[in-house]
Amino acid sequence: MAANIPTSFSFSTFIRVLLPGFIFSLLCTYFVFPIIPASFASFLIIDKILMLSLLDKILFWAITGLFFGMLISSFDYYIYRFFTGSGILPQFLWDGLYRSIIFEYNKLITDYDTKLGRYSSSEDPEEHRKLYRDLVDMSNKLRKFPFDIDELCTRPISPTRLGNIINEYESYPKVQYGMNFNVFWSRLWQIISKDSRDDLDFRAAKADFLIYILTIWILFSPVITYRVSTNFGIPAIFIIILCFLIALILYDIAVLAHENYGDYVKATFDLYRIDLAKKLGIPISLCPRRDEMAIWEKYNEFLHHCDVPESVSQLNNIIER
């Protein structure tokens, strides 16, 4: 995902930039500044910051928070690469996580097939009800994986849940309409209504905020563990476990936020691709035919690869037919 550096200040900017930066600055004040050696305190004015009144500290956190928030937003691409399983950690760790995802996926498929067979053969109304509920739940879990066009089923392609969620909604327009997400999302953004843009930006900001807070929490967990165990005499292992549990909770909430945002992204393609097609002079129908998908695919090649001579002629020929 591209860096989410704002071009104007809005409520979404407050959530995505200022709030994470404010929290980062606050944690620095209480967990990082106190452990900096005293010989550096006068040079860094840390001792004066620690003695500020609460109101002055809030003002300090807000000012420095804007800087830290912009910095965090600038690293958006690398943060998401980490949480989607495509960067920073050694490849063998990602491979291990991917094997775990595949194992869970295969188990889910097996359980689904087993319960579907029992549902088809069962004549007990109560068992029917329970099996139907389980099948719906498992079906919803399977739909959270990207759709494999070749296999005609959903399959995990990322070693993390977040990675599969993002890949699922970003691959949706390609599967449904032949539209590449990275090419056409910015084009759609230009024609959707302001209210829709604001709503989408707000949902994206909430999802980004949770990922940024999770990143901040992971970065500060070692310092928090050291400070709390030293000042309160609590065994470090308990603090580590607590930090890990909080990280898991934040991750689950972030995944849910991305699921919600992804649903609205897919709905945007469902609705506004028609307006985009009319502006581009592309024939369009509610349920796309193969020739319509071929037009989007050729136009995608033209925009994405700048393959001007061949792609343009092929595209025009398809539209004329």
Image (spheres, rainbow, N blue to C red):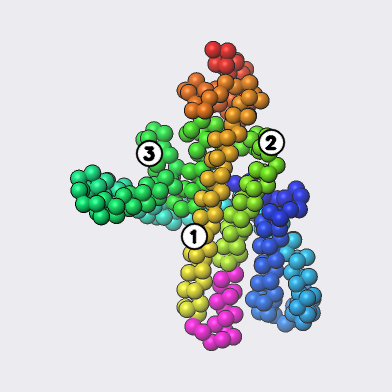
Dot placed on the residue nearer the N-terminal end, 2 or 3: 3
Dot placed on the residue nearer the N-terminal end, 1 or 2: 2
SS label for mark 2: helix
Q: Real-space Cα distance between discs 1 and 2?
A: 32 Å
Dot placed on the residue nearer the N-terminal end, 3 or 1: 3
Q: In the rendered structure, which segment of residues is drawn in magenta?
A: 220-235
**Residue that numbered label 2 is attached to:** 190
Q: Real-space Cα distance between discs 2 and 3?
A: 32 Å
Closest to the observer, 94 or 298? 298
**Magenta stretch prevailing secondary structure:** helix
Decide whether residue 224 is among the magenta residues. Answer: yes
The reply to whether the C-beta atoms of the residues labelled 3 and 1 are less than 8 Å apart is no
Q: Is residue 205 placed above or below 47 in the rendered structure? A: above
What is the x, y in percent for residue 290?
47, 23
SS label for mark 3: strand
Mark 1 surroundings within 10 Å by alpha-carbon count, few (fewer than 14), some (14 through 19), many (20 or more)? some
**Residue that numbered label 3 is attached to:** 153
What is the x, y in percent for residue 136?
36, 49
**Residue that numbered label 1 is attached to:** 252
Quarter assignment of residue 20: bottom right
Q: Amino acid at mark 3?
A: Cys
Q: Is residue 284 placed above or below 162 in the rendered structure? A: above
